[in-house]
Image (spheres, rainbow, N blue to C red):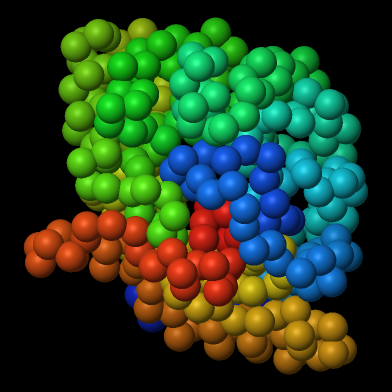
């Protein structure tokens, strides 16, 4: 052990355990068509939801094994009261070098300053369109102006870095790529275009709706000229590029060009299930032993043994289905999703 961290833990493909996505709630105040389009969902039982202290304890066990980056997700994480307190709890562990938050932005303006004061390092806001009427159609909510206020609040609060995540969907927002680049530039932000992913089953995914990395680059090249790839991203999901004037943007090509070989992240749901892959059908229950008083050694060994046995390459496996024509719809049948809410992306941190 060095500086409180055990020897590096790697999986069967040699990938280290470095990044943890921690979902603080499965609830959301939007109903985006690509994520959770149904009017009603089966929510996780409230008594099963981990307290912030329990989340911080689990994060400590992950840090013991090499995790140094945590991203807070949901559902919509800012629906959970006093998320800034969780940030403070996590930062008590000096081995955690970065805490980021992904939010839809609706509640961000009211909380950005307290999150900054708590020590949150980075904010990512989901923004899929700049047209209010499209936003309303996509999310089934009239909250576009509040999202823009949230984006504006990030810089005002003191954050030096802002990312905007855009799910690129053919036939929906493929005519807004340039506008989103320019919008991000105005706020000194970096937009990341995300290929539409077939996680879960209620999200109406179809291959012909995927706007590929190549298509995005071609469209932006027609507007801006030659685009230059930036150096390799390591384990980060986004491939980054530079426009001729130095403006940067990213593309996360999970659907057409999976990056499983470099993936060092896993995710813990709000009720303590640990998933080794976004596409995984099942997870490991960390809540039960934690609440039963299992020793730190026992908890660390659960995590260590789970990671060292990890062979998941879910995005590559989904990609391989294209050869047989079986990648035709959502990953999981809708009835099964209703039986187990963990199987949808909103419950496992996207």
The picture quadrant where one finds residue 306 is bottom right
Which residue is depicted at the point 41% across and 59% down? 201
The picture quadrant where one finds residue 338 is bottom right
39 displayed left or right of 157: left
Q: Is residue 240 visible?
A: no
Residue 135: percent from left, percent from top? 52, 24
Residue 137: percent from left, percent from top? 49, 27
Asked whether 50 or 101 is in front, the reply is 50
Q: Is residue 108 visible?
A: yes
212 displayed left or right of 64: left
Q: How many marks?
A: 0
9 displayed left or right of 280: right
The picture quadrant where one finds residue 347 is bottom right
Which residue is depicted at the point 84% across and 52% down? 86
Asked whether 276 or 103 is in front, the reply is 103
Residue 235: percent from left, percent from top? 43, 53
Residue 202 lies, with reference to residue 142, above or below; the image says below
Which residue is depicted at the point 35% across and 64% down? 331
Residue 280 lies, with reference to residue 106, above or below; the image says below
The quarter in which the N terminus is drawn is: bottom right
Residue 120: percent from left, percent from top? 76, 39
Asked whether 15 or 28 is in front, the reply is 28
Which residue is depicted at the point 18% across and 65% down? 326
């Amino acid at each position: 052990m060095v500086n409180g961290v055990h020897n590096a833990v790697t999986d069967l493909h040699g990938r280290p355990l470095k990044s943890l996505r921690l979902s603080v709630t499965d609830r959301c105040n939007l109903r985006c068509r690509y994520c959770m389009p149904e009017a009603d969902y089966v929510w996780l039982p409230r008594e099963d939801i981990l307290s912030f202290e329990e989340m911080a304890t689990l994060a400590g066990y992950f840090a013991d094994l090499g995790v140094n980056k945590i991203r807070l997700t949901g559902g919509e994480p800012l629906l959970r009261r006093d998320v800034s307190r969780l940030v403070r709890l996590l930062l008590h562990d000096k081995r955690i070098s970065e805490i980021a938050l992904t939010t839809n932005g609706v509640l961000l303006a009211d909380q950005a300053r307290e999150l900054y004061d708590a020590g949150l390092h980075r904010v990512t806001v989901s923004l899929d369109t700049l047209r209010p009427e499209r936003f309303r159609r996509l999310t089934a909510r009239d909250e576009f102006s509040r999202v823009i206020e949230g984006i504006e609040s990030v810089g005002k609060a003191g954050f030096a870095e802002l990312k905007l995540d855009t799910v690129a969907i053919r036939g929906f927002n493929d005519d807004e790529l340039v506008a989103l680049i320019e919008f991000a530039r105005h706020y000194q932000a970096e937009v990341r275009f995300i290929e539409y992913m077939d996680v879960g089953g209620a999200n109406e995914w179809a291959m012909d709706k995927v706007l590929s990395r190549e298509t995005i680059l071609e469209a932006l090249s027609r507007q801006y000229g030659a685009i230059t790839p930036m150096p390799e991203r390591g384990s980060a999901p986004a491939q980054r590029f530079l426009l001729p004037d130095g403006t940067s943007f990213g593309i996360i090509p999970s659907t057409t060009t999976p990056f499983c070989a470099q993936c060092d992240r896993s995710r813990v749901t709000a009720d303590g299930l640990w998933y080794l892959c976004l596409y995984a059908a099942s997870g490991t229950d960390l809540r039960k032993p934690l609440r039963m008083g299992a020793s730190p050694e026992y908890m660390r060994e659960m995590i260590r043994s789970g990671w060292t046995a990890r062979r998941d390459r879910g995005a590559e496996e989904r990609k391989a289905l294209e050869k047989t024509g079986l990648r035709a719809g959502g990953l999981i049948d809708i009835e099964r999703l209703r039986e187990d809410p963990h199987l949808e992306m909103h419950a496992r941190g996207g």
